[in-house]
Image (cartoon, coloured by chain):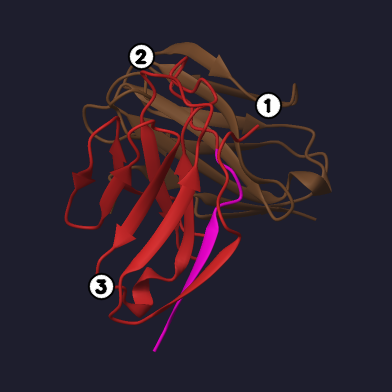
Amino acid sequence: DAKTTQPTSMDCAEGRAANLPCNHSTISGNEYVYWYRQIHSQGPQYIIHGLKNNETNEMASLIITEDRKSSTLILPHATLRDTAVYYCIGGGGYNQGGKLIFGQGTELSVKP
Amino acid sequence: DSGVTQTPKHLITATGQRVTLRCSPRSGDLSVYWYQQSLDQGLQFLIQYYNGEERAKGNILERFSAQQFPDLHSELNLSSLELGDSALYFCASSVGVGGHNSPLHFGNGTRLTVT
């Protein structure tokens, strides 16, 4: 079973920052937090991952709380093409084998 | 483009039949994963192979089997197909065994329709 909690849906205005929260209170000390997104039945797309420190890449920023029980994915300037289901993955013992356990995710709608 | 190639993109077949789905991982990736996504179940992990060996098993039915070949491509075999097997089947690959610091990269899937 998924070990994360995310809002079912969120809206964001185009050009504004989208902040997607995730709770992963059962995450172990050596397990990374991963974020993926899925656009309309395409394959899930890797966005970013991190362990303890905040991370940034060309797609997004990841803010992880000090106790590692929650994180926030930030899309700094959301566009209509960012409309997708966003999955946060953390905990569940996935490091044993490497499989990722997906929950239901957050459906992000970016509106003009 | 993730670099993971899945064929065919679409497959329509009848109940009771057998099909084979194929996956070519990203160059250099040793692990291959199979996931099933149906409307009511979300993304479900099926099975993982690492360098030819089965590494982890999820909710894979006994009617389903997979293997990873020496050239690292993988095949998922689905037999005695039922209507409920209609779904998107995704393959993913990673450099190592995944988890830790080894993201999975997904293909665009095979859409299987069983009639």
- Check chain identity for marks 2 and 3: say if they share one: no
Q: Chain of mark 1?
A: B
In the orientation shown, which residue stands out farthest toward the bottom?
Answer: A112
Query: Marks 2/3: CA distance?
Result: 40 Å
Same subunit: marks 2 and 1:
yes
In this picture, which residue range is highlighted in magenta? A102-112
Which of pointers 2 and 3 indicates the residue nearer the eye? 3
Can you say which quadrant of the picture contains the C terminus of chain B? Answer: bottom right
- Residue depicted at 38% across the width and 28% down the height: B73
Residue A102: percent from left, percent from top:
55, 40
Of the chain colours in the picture, the one used for chain A is red
* Contact between labelled residues 1 and 3, with CB atoms less than 8 Å apart: no
Label 3, label 1: how far apart the Cα atoms are: 40 Å
Where residue A97 appears, x then y in whole percent?
46, 16
Which callout, 3 or 1, points to the residue nearer the camera? 3
Residue at mark 1? B60
Instruction: Name the residue tied to disc 2.
Output: B51
Name the kind of residue labelled 3 in the image: His
Query: What residue did someone put label 3 on?
Result: A77
Residue appearing at x 39%, y 89% in the figure:
A112
Is residue B115 visible from the viewing direction of this image?
A: yes
Mark-to-mark CA distance, 2 and 1:
20 Å
Residue A34 image point, x, y percent: 38, 39
